Image: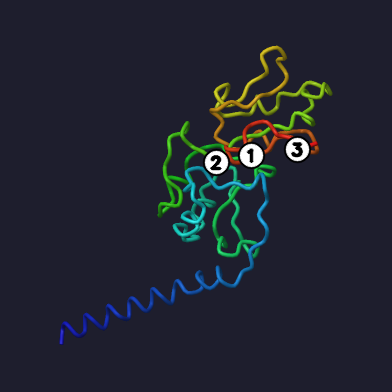
Amino acid sequence: MRRRGALQRLIRGAALLAAASLPYGMARLMVPEAKAQSRNHIRPPGALKDDAAFIAACIGCGLCGEVCPPRCIRFHGRDGGEKVNTPWINPEEKGCTLCNKCMEVCPTEALVETPLKEIDMGIAQIDRAACYPWVDRGICGACVSVCPLGDQAIGFEMWNQYRPIIKSGCVGCGLCVEVCPEPSLPIWVVDRMQGSVAKHSV
């Protein structure tokens, strides 16, 4: 009788867990996915590089957003499809300060604690056809001044101290995007394979 009672409690517990997770699972199935932005739409630091694996690992708990000091972490809603409730950052609004809190609080392997210099959210890319100093329309340097990684991530062209260049140490935090004063936003975060200089086709 004891064994039967224990088995019944186990079955009830499993059924309760399945019922509790049903709304989250149904939300992912019922929400249509909007077309993703090609730039300035990045995952938080420490996110699994395979986005499918990240989506599978993230349980949509929202803890990363709750502990984020600059409140830069947002969550997919009706635009997300299977990505609904997963976190993302739009550096046009708020860049990541690389405080590591989101990685520390994540209860799954969606966000993995990663050393600062090994974080890879992408790389900043500059459109030299629009950046003020690159088109000789003034002195700026806002992106260089705000970078939390300093000259290992961004600096100035050797013979022109005002033209910014992105270096291999950039981790794609997006703070440079947030502070850029040029309305067309000639700096953004892209996949590292796309390089740090925007290419234009003729």
Which is more toward the observer, 22 or 104? 22
- Binning the other alpha carbons within 10 Å of mark 3 as few (below 14), some (14 to 19) or many (20 upward) gives some
In the displayed orientation, state which residue is furthest to the front.
202
Q: Which quadrant of the figure contains the N terminus?
A: bottom left
User: Tag 2 or tag 1, which sits nearer the N-term?
Assistant: 2
The answer for how far apart the CA atoms under marks 2 and 3 are is 19 Å
Per the rendering, the mark at residue 121 is 2
Residue found 23% across the figure and 81% down from its top: 7
Q: Position of residue 31 (x, y in %)?
A: 61, 69
In this rendering, would 99 be left or right of 187? left
Residue found 56% across the figure and 37% down from its top: 97
Residue found 32% across the figure and 81% down from its top: 12
Which is more toward the observer, 175 or 105? 175
For badge 1, the amino acid type reads Val
User: Tag 3 or tag 2, which sits nearer the N-term?
Assistant: 2
For badge 3, the amino acid type reads Leu
For badge 2, the amino acid type reads Met
- Binning the other alpha carbons within 10 Å of mark 2 as few (below 14), some (14 to 19) or many (20 upward) gives many
Identify residue for label 3.
Answer: 185
Q: From this view, report whether residue 177 is shown above or below residue 25.
A: above
Q: Secondary structure at mark 1?
A: strand
In the displayed orientation, state which residue is furthest to the right.
137
In this rendering, would 72 be left or right of 14? right
The answer for how far apart the CA atoms under marks 3 and 1 are is 11 Å
In this rendering, would 147 be left or right of 10? right
The answer for how far apart the CA atoms under marks 1 and 2 are is 8 Å
